[in-house]
Amino acid sequence: MISWKLVQKAKCILEKERGAVRKPWGGRIAICLIYPNSYHVGMSNLGFQTVYQLLNAEDDVVCERAFLPGPEELQEYRNSQTPLFSLESQKPLSDFDILAFSVSFENDFINILTQLELARIPLERRLREEGHPLVIAGGVAVFLNPEPLSEFFDLFVLGEGEEVIGEFLEVYRETFTRKGPIEKDDFLKRLSAVDGIYVPKFYRVTYAEDGKVEAMEPEPGFPQRVKRRWIQEMDRFPARSTLFTPDTEFKEMALVEVNRGCPRGCRFCAACFVYHPFRSRTLPLLESLSETSLLKEPRVGLAGTAVSDYPHLLSLCQSILSHRGGISIASLRIDAITHPLIQCLREGGNQTVAIAPEAGSERLRKVLRKGYTEDEILKAVSAIIENGLSQIKCYFLIGLPTETEDDVRAIILLAKRIRHQILSIRKGLKERWRLILSVHPFIPKPATPFQWVPLEEVGILKRKLKVIQGGIKGEKGMEMIHDLPKWAYIQALLSRGDRRVGKILMAAYRCQGDWGKALRETSINPDFYVYRRRDLDEIFPWDFIDHGMPKERLKEEYLKAMKEAEIKINEQ
């Protein structure tokens, strides 16, 4: 039984779209690409769109999409007992050969279980039978650390998926076009020979008496470490928006990916290390992609982990302007801000520029390896305001390693100096301006130099947020936005956990998202993963992944940071 109301909702969504691919199923490999959040969020994700495009470029593949239903739709699914279906053909997910999840954020992990339950697929892989679809996952959240999800997925794609997709499909074709029955385990064994494919059931984890990971051993014939994949020649795989809908964060904008990785090496930044090395697409290709994109939408959003470090950024922006296109860039490096670049952004329709000082004090910025001086920050602010932009967004982190009360108050002082700089330049002008402080708890991430440090306690993070809020209260034109520290706790738990954390995730799902109740009801201590400083020689749950950056090098950076902060770390 399928709800007519839900089918009509899907058809209404499709009517608003441009670029959706519709293929007949006959004889094709049927893949449902699933985003574990709303349609609005999923369709704002360029990686999701890129995979959709690549899969549908294969003649023998039909790839459709599914998303997390909104609260009203979710209730309708359950009341009508409708199985979760795909957007394009409204076929139940259980009819597909492969369910491929694109996972960007740890806080979406629980939504994966909701989608599997709605699709009537057993949540745990051990309970699935031969007739069930293969359930796989990729995306940055899982190639940082897939272990908390390891009991729910048949396999993970670790790293950048563009090259893996073709190799995965080759193995699939070779396996399932042969005569005779094929068992899933045989197929998974063949797949595990592909670099970047991790099949968790073939790896055994043991734990020491103190709860730490003692060892992770593969079955005979499987690699000790799984190499994450990365693209060496970025021009081989252009990444741009191919699906257009008014219901995204980027309405009337086409995204074009400029680069991946980052040359800066900021010690807190996962994107810098897991997307290493820094790679950019060529200017002629980006100009061509931008020109084509402007045939679809009036603005081009330049995306990437380090757009400001693209050596031809000004030329690219000028090229977009020459085709009468608007320009959008998520944030700019402070030392990349120049008068000509800001002029381009203003001519391209921007009124806001985002910068990321990250910390209020110069001392703490050096610890982060983001050593901008206050003068450099104020100089960048001047360039922004002098060229007529009216809004600046500043990103800050709290709870950073070695952070003191003075460092927290330094955020207030720096914000006030920025405000003063704005007022001194705009003196006599009546146009409104805004300074937005976007303050977020620091979450230590796998595969970074700060993977050894704990999350700061939620109560302390709350107090620091109140200090900043109180410090800017009454400052005209200035406001603050922030994440809730309790969600930072959950994200830290899921990003740094081992396989046992999957039990907590299952409990949270059964408690309908009530994490507090789930944490109380499980026997596993979540603080062990969140608040504990890791030993220097500790085995991490994600150490089996070869991220392309030696752990010893990360350790050296960590120790160097602590030395710079004049804090001695004892070898353990």
Image (cartoon, rainbow, N blue to C red):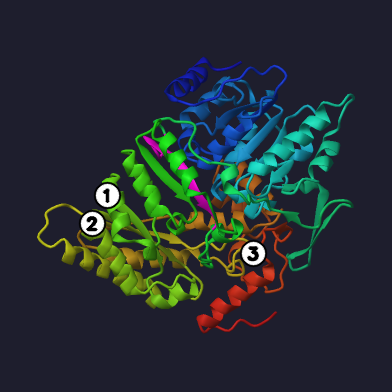
Tag 1 residue: 346
Report the disc number at residue 132.
Answer: none
Contact flag, marks 1 and 2 (Cβ < 8 Å): yes
Q: Residue at x 52, y 63 (%)?
A: 263
Q: Is residue 123 visible?
A: no
Residue at the far left in the pictured view: 428
Using the rendered view, name the quadrant where residue 326 is placed. top left
Q: Earlier in the sequence, mark 2 or mark 3?
A: 2
Q: Would you say residue 266 sits in the magenta stretch?
A: no
Q: Earlier in the sequence, mark 1 or mark 2?
A: 1
Tell me which residue sits at (49%, 46%) in the image: 257
The N terminus - image quarter: top right
State left or right for residue 453 relative to residue 363: right
Please tell me how crowded label 2 is: few (under 14), some (14-19), or many (20+) other residues with Cα within 10 Å: some
At 52% across and 18% down in the image, what residue appears? 7
Name the quadrant containing residue 395: bottom left
Instruction: Say what secondary structure mark 1 lies in.
Output: helix
Write down the residue under mark 2.
387
Q: Position of residue 143 (x, y in %)?
A: 64, 51
The residue segment tinted magenta is 248-261
Instruction: Estimate the x, y position of residue 64 in percent, counting from the top left.
Output: 59, 27
Mark 3 = which residue?
528
Residue type at mark 1? Answer: Arg
Q: Badges 2 and 3: C-beta atoms under 8 Å apart?
A: no
Q: Measure the alpha-carbon separation of dots 2 and 3.
A: 50 Å
